[in-house]
Image (cartoon, rainbow, N blue to C red):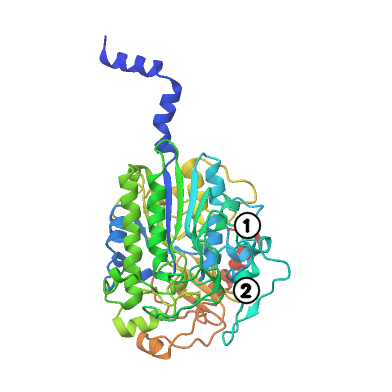
Amino acid sequence: MNRSLFTTLALLLMPLSLLQSADAPSARPNIVILYADDMGYGDLGVQNPESRIPTPNLDGLAAHGTRFTDAHSSSGVCTPSRYALLHGRYHWRKFHGIVNAFDQPILDADRTTLPEMLKTKGYKTACIGKWHLGWDWNAIKRPGAMPTKEAGKGQGSFAPNAFDWNKPIPGGPLSHGFDYYFGDDVPNFPPYAWFENDRVITEPTVPLSTPKQTAEGAWEARPGPSVKDWDFWAVMPKLTEKAVEWIAQQKQDEPFFLYLPFTSPHAPIVPTPDFIGKSKAGGFGDFVAQTDDTVGRVLQALKDGGFAENTLVIFSADNGPEHYAYDRIRNFQHRSMGPLRGLKRDIWEGGHRVPFVIRWPGVVPAGKVNDGILSQIDVFATIATVVGADIPAGSGEDSYSQLTLIKGDSPSARDTVVHNTNADGYALRHGDWVLIAAKTGAVSKVPEWFDQANGYTRNTQPGELYNLRNDLAQKHNLYAAQPDKVRELSTLLEHVRAKGQVR
């Protein structure tokens, strides 16, 4: 019999279920989101020629994937960026600030989250790491329990016995589409304890104590209930271990989604002893090096499990670097914000333009650099397109599918994105232009020496206007010189805020 005819007949006789299962892995890739905390644009080594921090695993991820140089978080702080990532929606449509200790959940019950969408396509889902989107603490709070004031700190908290720690806590990851959760909720917020699924594993019985020094900066640990002898240095190693274990438990015929929001390099800056001195940028640099090591271990776990070739890996960060970055420039000659102006909280570029790398073998080009505008809110619609999921009405309304962009086949699906941290300060990016509809793009205090050393002057106009193609560092305010452009972008900002995205 003719060989080609034999092959055709064999395929026709093959059970349909086998054909479908053969196609399933490529149609439903595993998805891993690695989300750093307070890691700046210039902390990614391959992105900063003058970096003092080694990031070989992230550099390798970029070498085997595509690095996006114009990617943005929704906010300059952490909770809003996480909300936007998981909902595909600008945070400022609902709120601006962070979820504080023992606050209620901020995710919307009537809007679909990314893991909820993926579960409709048969995905197993897990969140391991920093949650920071709230829990329903009232469900386990004892009757009459009231917050107390910590002497000299001016922050309200609760005594350890204010809660019944034996009860499940609703409103967390398991209430929003995750099958499994392990983490410490927020590294510098109480309760200082390990969570698994919807429970605290070990009861916090004492107020927090921080007797040792951090490697850099302040503890920034808010007072409240803690497990006795809570070890901040053990947090990232434990999260890494759990992520590797969870990946090893997965099956080839069941796609999975792992959302791994790191607690590093956010304060408290606590690199473990084996990473001390790994960088030339102090304690923070060492903590970034440890973060990079976690990335390497997760990527190795994917390889060991036989998942690497069919896994879409996204690496990014929630916002720019903390204010310690200014001293890091003077002390170590390392610019965590790279060539950008601004840090965490700011609506200048350094507050929200973040590292962003995607690896997906055979789909996303390897070793490429892409300068298309990309927002983390686009992850939602992009993944929906990848897996063929329907986005329910009222969900993901600000998200664009960027699948053709990440495949290198076309320009960005968006040319407009809104940046915001506080209620009284918005910025609009449109094409090459950025309008800052506020007196200044700064939210964090900028040292005078930094402005003087970098040629920045105090703004005397009602707002700021920059052309990023010619002025990425945002040094030349064109607000007074380009009134027509200011009016055009101001009108566009009002439209997006009032009516939604411009498509």
174 vs 344, nearest the viewer: 174
Count the numbered circles shown: 2
Amino acid at pointer 1: Lys
Q: Please say if 361 is above or below 50.
A: above
Q: Which residue, as the protein is rendered here, is positioned at the far right?
A: 144
Q: Which residue, as the protein is rendered here, is positioned at the far top?
A: 1
- Residue ID at (48%, 79%): 478
Q: Dividing the image into 4 quarters, which one contains the N terminus?
A: top left
Q: Please say if 281 is above or below 9.
A: below
Residue 167 in picture, x, y percent from top left:
63, 57
**Mark 1 Cα within 10 Å, few/some/many (few <14, many 20+)?**
few
Q: Is residue 163 left or right of residue 296?
A: right
The disc label shown at residue 158, or none:
2
**Mark 2 Cα within 10 Å, few/some/many (few <14, many 20+)?**
many
Element carrying mark 2: loop
Element carrying mark 1: loop
- Residue ID at (45%, 51%): 258
- Residue ID at (35%, 16%): 10
Compute the Cα span from label 2 to label 1: 17 Å
Residue 56 in picture, x, y percent from top left:
27, 62
261 vs 148, nearest the viewer: 148
The disc label shown at residue 167, or none:
1
Amino acid at pointer 2: Phe
Quadrant location of residue 134?
Answer: bottom right
Q: Please say if 86 is above or below 72.
A: above
The disc label shown at residue 476, or none:
none
Choose the circle earlier in sequence order: 2 or 1.
Answer: 2
307 vs 371, nearest the viewer: 307
